Image (tube, grey):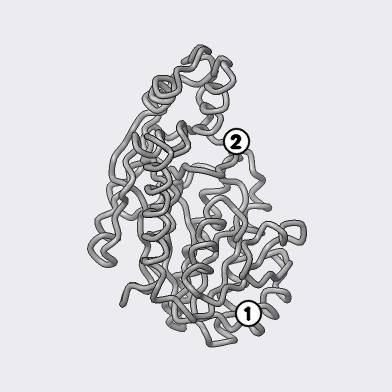
Amino acid sequence: MGSESASLSRAVARDQRVGESASLSGERVLVTGATGFIGTPLTGSLVAAGAEVAAVVLPGEVALLPPGARAYAADVTDVDALRRIVSDAQPQVVFHLAAVGLTNPHLPAADALRVNTGSVIALLEALHEAGCARRIILLGSSYEYGARRADDSCDPFNAYAASKVAAWAFARAAYNTWNAPAVWARPFQVYGPGQPEAAFIPAALRAARHGDDFPMTGGEQQRDFIFVDDIVTGLLALAQADGIEGRAFDLGTGQLHTLREVAERIWQLSGARGRLRVGALPYRPGEVTAIPADPERARRLTGWQAQVTLDAGLRRLVFGD
């Protein structure tokens, strides 16, 4: 794709994200994890749409926020700080993205509970006291399902996934006891620009570009890969749809691809000189073979569905389109 066409594609995608958030113009929005992989494009879209964005970030990350977002430097585990921030910002819409341990299978259970569960409880309590929020979007994880995905039942296989299940249980309790306007979003295998290099796709891309060999497992794991732009539009849709409080939504494409298939496509697109060393690494303990998304509920109740195919997303990463 030529540079002119690539620029046009990026502009169209950006305009679509802004359009999705247009009805949030003028609303007070609070975002935690606003400088993260998903939080950065989400915060930028909200600012561009005219929302009054307050962002909770760690003290060293304030400078990473887009212009126009109001920074609150705090740790999401600080209960008193969250209460003060909510009282001051009076958010009508909240996106709680801050978490730890997504790529760390050895995350200590105490840390997972303190951050991933404790921050949800503290935020819900602060919002209950303030009485200002009409919608609270809480970010879960596809890993909550574990090896079972026949229905909404969860079967977490590590501390990170278990802490997310526990957080959703507290959110449901808040919904049942005081009608907390909470919605639970479960993104699946998110990828795209700005993803931490430890993740599978950016690690493969780095090896391909440098001409390095890429050691990996047998690559039989099947995942539902979804481009970060689609996650942003999905979160915005959850913020605006009527009558969905208390529900959990999968944000995925509904299509499964093996890790080996993805790595091979990256090698084909990039003309990599290194070797794919399939089977060089062991599978992680408790590795789940397949984690499929069921995006039908999100499509039916919000009108959202993913737009970027895996091939299109990989091309955008490889060629910068």
N-term mark: 2 or 1:
1
Label 2 sits on residue: 197
Quarter where residue 242 is shown: bottom left
Label 2: how many Cα within 10 Å (few below 14, some 14–19, many 20+): few
Q: What is the quadrant of the C terminus in the image?
A: top left
Q: Residue at x 52, y 72 (%)?
A: 94
Whole-angstrom CA distance, mark 2 to mark 1, is 33 Å
Q: Nearer the viewer, mark 2 or mark 1?
A: 2
Mark 1, secondary structure of its residue: helix
Q: State whether residue 7 is above or below residue 171.
A: above
Q: Residue at x 65, y 72 (%)?
A: 70
Quarter where residue 60 is shown: bottom right
Whole-percent x and y of residue 42?
Answer: 50, 60
Q: State whether residue 225 is above or below residue 298.
A: above
Q: Amino acid at mark 2?
A: Glu
Whole-percent x and y of residue 104?
Answer: 61, 40
Q: State whether residue 180 is above or below residue 187.
A: below
* Residue 86 marker: 1
Q: Are marks 2 and 1 in contact (CB under 8 Å)?
A: no
Q: Amino acid at mark 1?
A: Val
Mark 2, secondary structure of its residue: loop
- Closer to us: 278 or 303: 303
Whole-percent x and y of residue 80?
Answer: 73, 76
- Closer to us: 76 or 150: 76
Left or right: 300 in relation to 36 = left
